[in-house]
Image (cartoon, rainbow, N blue to C red):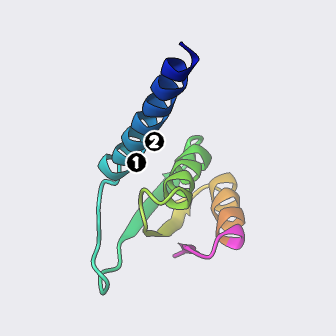
Amino acid sequence: MIVDFIVGLTIASILLILLWSVKGVLLTPISSGENTLISIDLSVSGKEPMLEQTIKGIIWLRENGTLKAKVHINTQNADTAAKHIARCYADMYDFITLL
């Protein structure tokens, strides 16, 4: 009885690990070659209250390996709060640049 439980638990654990790995591969939206650079251009104009959440989402995708891209933020027409947010994140992360 205990042996059956241990075998079942082991098989379930292996299956869970395999499914987790497949999920990671399926969630990778874009795969690039060795000589390909992917970049995201964000253009912000006026007041943008969701800018920080957008940047945090891109950072999350980048840090967990789902999306390997550089981020360029254009804040030419943005208000001072949006410019400040973009500047702070550009200072914290090397892959974010301001235009």
Who's the residue at 29% across and 72% down the image?
Answer: 32
| Residue 94 is one of the magenta-drawn residues | yes
Quarter-of-image position of residue 20: top left
Residue 91, position in %: x, y? 71, 72
Relative side of 40 to 55, left or right: left
Q: Nearer the viewer, mark 1 or mark 2?
A: 2
Q: Which mark is residue 70?
A: none
> Which residue is the site of mark 1?
21
Q: Amino acid at mark 2?
A: Ile
**Contact, CB < 8 Å: mark 1 with mark 2?**
yes
Quarter-of-image position of residue 79: bottom right
Q: Residues within 10 Å of mark 2 (few under 14, many from 20)?
A: few
Who's the residue at 45% across and 41% down the image?
Answer: 17
Q: How many marks?
A: 2
Measured Cα–Cα span from mark 1 to mark 2:
6 Å
Residue 74 versus residue 48 in the image, above or below: below
Who's the residue at 37% across and 39% down the image?
Answer: 19
Relative side of 34 to 88, left or right: left
Which residue lies most toward the top here? 1
Q: Residues within 10 Å of mark 1 (few under 14, many from 20)?
A: few
Q: Nearer the viewer, residue 46 or 9?
A: 9
Residue 92, position in %: x, y? 71, 68
> Which residue is the site of mark 2?
17
Residue 40, position in %: x, y? 40, 65
Who's the residue at 56% across and 59% down the image?
Answer: 63
Which secondary structure, mark 2? helix
Which secondary structure, mark 1? helix
Q: Amino acid at mark 1?
A: Ser
Question: Is residue 94 at all visible to an observer of this figure?
Answer: yes
Question: Is residue 48 at all visible to an observer of this figure?
Answer: no
What residue range appears in magenta?
A: 91-99
Q: Nearer the viewer, residue 88 or 29?
A: 29
